[in-house]
Amino acid sequence: MTYSSPVHIEIVDAIALIAIDNPPVNATSHAVRQGLFDAIEKITAQSEIKAVAIYGMGRTFIAGADIREFGKPLLPPSLPDICLSIENLNKPVVAVLHGTALGGGLEVALSAHARVALPGTKLGLPEVNLGILPGAGGTQRTPRLIGIPAALDMVTTGRHVPAEEALELGLIDRIQGGDPRDVALSMATAALKGDLPTRSTANLTVVPNDAAIKDTAETLKAKKPHLFSPHKCVEAIAAASTLPFADGLKRERELFLECMESPQRTGLMHAFFAERAVADIPEKTAQARPIEALGVIGGGQMGSGIATAALIAGLPVTLVERDTASLEKGKASIEKNLAAAVKRGKLSPEKHDEILGHALTCTTNRQNLSESDLIIEAVFEDMEVKKEIFRALDGIAKDGAVLATNTSYLDINEIAAVTKRPADVIGLHFFSPAHVMRLLEVVVPDKTAPQVVATGFALAKKMRKIAVRAGVCDGFIGNRILSHYKKVADYLVLDGATPQQVDQALVEFGLAMGPFAVSDLAGLEIGWATRKRQAATRPSEERYVAIADRICEREWYGRKTGQGFYVYPESGKPYANPEVDVIIQEERQKAGVTPREFSNDEIVARFTTAMISEALRVLEEGIALRPIDIDATFLFGYGFPRFRGGPMHYANTVGVPNLIQSIETWSIEDAHFWKVPDLLSQLNKDSADIASLN
Ligand code: CAA
């Protein structure tokens, strides 16, 4: 019997096989929910059916809620009702899992009477990452199966649990290899014969563990002070140990609705969506060129990080440096990165040995790049040096090779113009440390071929990075906006705040680090070099804050030299640099500034408004495709708080009229810096919001 729905029923003797067929990941869309509900109802009425198995067609079991339905009203039947109807079915139901069983998908499986996973399956309840909690019985059934501590771990971290661990925990009952449909048939048969024990999860008792609940609650309070839903997850699991099943479900629903109403939920769902939306580029239908071997020029921090990322992604790398000493340094740095990846569980010891044995070639001879499909230049930021490299590459690289620069500011059109193949030249701007940070800005100069852009995106996917398409300008999307909001941080300090107050206010807002701590980490000489480069074209009416220059003149470049805005002792915590305080006083005097107090709210407002203003100009100029691309850039490259959804999503919550009002107020004191972007005025005129530009 087959329905024209994404849920099919196949009857084999006394067994009903329910197949979910909703590519690509069998998400629980409305049609799937309706199909499941109808299937259960139908099977309930058929007395000749004695056992049931549910499985997924294609690459995976159900990978959770359908992201295409996020933010829309949920149509019945609801997932909690479907789970109850599965659990209450008058015949044994086995869930057969493969690929990923996530979120609502795992909740469906938990309501079955036994769970069997194919080898390699991953199981998880990632709802917390979306600002919600498992709301279809997940918080009540999970602790019944695996106990309170393991349930707390799964639900508050959202991590993917491998099948072997799930078996050990008791989340599943068996691991069985084979085709999902065949396993479904054999396991339903086993359940019918009593060879696979079945029981209703709701009937299991929870062993109370108040200490684990208290511990987790305290840890979360300390580690995730900004977040709402992890705390609600703990409350829901606590309810499982104090309330009967039906009341526990009610409590779960109440807490779920609280999460749904939290602004963090919209921010986190937007961030989740952004991660995927950025792949929608004008070149998405272009055929990416095959990349089987990568070349990297420059073995410094960036080059070695990029090489590490490529090696971990399974790509052989040829690393080129200008002399043996630099080459050795680059190689050592890659080895260190790889060892750290093993330690973090990102790379198996076997793969690590294989990489060092076969995949990495280190050389001082550029000619060895002649077989590379894609070559990334990652030497220091000097236009002439980069031009020399690209001229040379033009003579060395094979036809069709992609020639990429990792520049973070320079004009890639100018670099492309020194080659006879500008269509093959692109910017691939990685973020440091390149083997850890998820963002990759794919910077597209005027003459780049669509296939080359698609290749940049394909490389990012292979490296499990998030690629954002950017146009050419000084700093592209991220660093261009950063240069602007960094100025406001400097103005705040010149006008009366301390660097520590600015950092603290922004960390409280949710940024991973404040701007001065970031500068110290990146190296103060980087910004210094940029400011020197821009000096000749800096408008005379722009306020210039020389505090960081004064620090650099002392050869204090931040963390790497032991001091910058902060002092970094060998042991113990960094502290405010007292000498910087003196520099600040001197610079205030020179500028004739009488210091005044700023509240933390005003610091955050000025900082984020500067960020938003420049972001709108980046949009106006077509450097970023959509506001959501800017959100992704800042979420995955600059530590913007995920729960705020990114700067543009946040701007939307502030509102166009409020932004204009703030800018106009501050423009009284500095009309050059605080200008209302044309796009913002236009939105105001049209009574439209920033999200409408997506
Ligand atoms: N809904 C709809 N489409 C989805 C989807 C979802 N939940 N998850 C992934 N997709 C789509 C992707 O957009 C992508 O589409 P395109 O091929 O058109 O680009 C395709 O599926 C493949 O995705 P990936 O490239 O990410 O594939 P992968 O193999 O690397 O990873 C995955 C697969 C592990 C399932 C990963 O996509 C993933 O983690 N997805 C999100 C899972 C999730 O968090 N689900 C929501 C849980 S919360 C929940 O379920 C709550 C509730 O019920 C109310």
Image: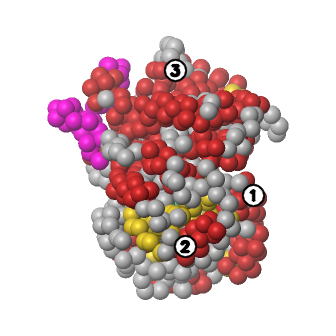
> Which element carries disc 2, helix, strand or loop?
helix
In terms of sequence position, does the residue under pointer 2 or pointer 3 come before the other? 2
* Mark 2 residue type: Leu
The colour scheme applied to this rendered structure is secondary structure
| Residue holding disc 2 | 185
Question: Could you tell me how far apart the alpha carbons at marks 1 and 2 are, in whole angstroms?
Answer: 24 Å
Q: Look at 59% across and 23% down and name the residue there.
A: 501
CB within 8 Å, label 3 to label 1: no
Which percent across, then down, holds residue 149? Answer: 73, 41
Residue 429 location (% of width, % of height): 49, 59
Label 2 and label 3: CA atoms lie apart by 62 Å
Q: Which of marks 3 and 1 is in front?
A: 1
**Residue 674 falls inside the magenta stretch:** yes
The residue shown at (29%, 52%) is 622
- The image quarter containing residue 665 is top left
Q: Does the magenta stretch include residue 487?
A: no
Three-letter amino acid code of the residue under disc 3: Asn
Where does label 3 land, which residue? Answer: 600
Q: Quadrant of residue 117?
A: bottom right
Mark 1 or mark 2, which has the lower sequence index?
1
Residue, x 57% and y 68% (percent of image)? 188
User: What residue occupies the far left of the structure in this picture?
Assistant: 686
Provide residue 345's location: percent of width, then percent of height.
72, 60
The image's mark for residue 168 is 1
Q: In this view, does 497 lie above or below 216?
A: above
